[in-house]
Image: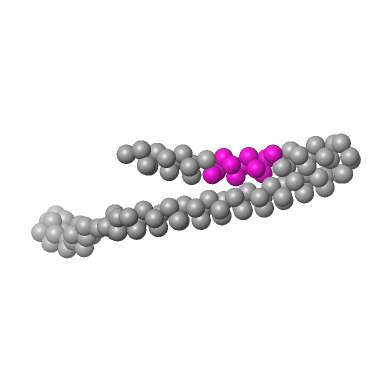
Amino acid sequence: MARPWKDIGRYGGAGIEFLLTILILSWLGHWLDTRWFLHGWGLTAGFLLGCAVAFRNLMRIAGRMQRDIERAEARDPEAGRWTVDESWVHKEPDKSSSEDADDGT
């Protein structure tokens, strides 16, 4: 039962990590702008570098998640199969109720 919580903890912080990476590197670029008068180039470079690093981390996390899913399916092949009860999807309309509605009197 502890396994789902472990996965949530492992992958739940991906969005926060993504955002913080961009913010921290942008702040560093802004700091360089104020220190060496780079006229916004430090902030731009920091933001672009932050985006690149954040997307790289996101791709690494996605790959790790895919490997974990494949391992879990290899352990229990039946757990990954979805079953859908289609009896409610393709119901024929009830003709007696539509005939009553068409009376119109």
x and y percentages locating residue 91 in the rendered image = 18, 61
Which corner quadrant holds the N terminus? top left
Q: Is residue 99 visible?
A: no
Which corner quadrant holds the C terminus? bottom left
x and y percentages locating residue 104 in the rendered image = 16, 56
The answer to which image quadrant residue 101 occupies is bottom left
Q: At x 67% / y 44%, what residue is drawn?
A: 22
Q: How many marks?
A: 0
Q: At x 72% / y 47%, what residue is drawn?
A: 47
Locate residue 24 relative to residue 96 in the image: left or right: right
Q: At x 72% / y 51%, what residue is drawn?
A: 48
Instruction: Assess whether residue 104 is covered by the magenta stretch.
Output: no
x and y percentages locating residue 62 in the rendered image = 51, 53
Relative to 84, residue 32 above or below:
above
Instruction: Assess whether residue 18 is covered by the magenta stretch.
Output: yes
Q: Is residue 77 visible?
A: yes
From the viewer's side, name the closer residue of 97 and 74: 74
Q: Main secondary structure of the magenta part?
A: helix
Relative to 3, residue 62 above or below:
below
Please identify the residue farthest to the left as the structure is shown. Answer: 96
Q: Which residues are magenta?
A: 14-24
x and y percentages locating residue 88 in the rendered image = 20, 57
Locate residue 91 relative to residue 61 in the image: left or right: left
From the viewer's side, name the closer residue of 44 and 55: 55
Locate residue 25 relative to residue 84 in the image: left or right: right
Q: At x 45% / y 56%, what residue is drawn?
A: 67
Locate residue 52 relative to residue 39 in the image: left or right: left
From the viewer's side, name the closer residue of 38 and 101: 38
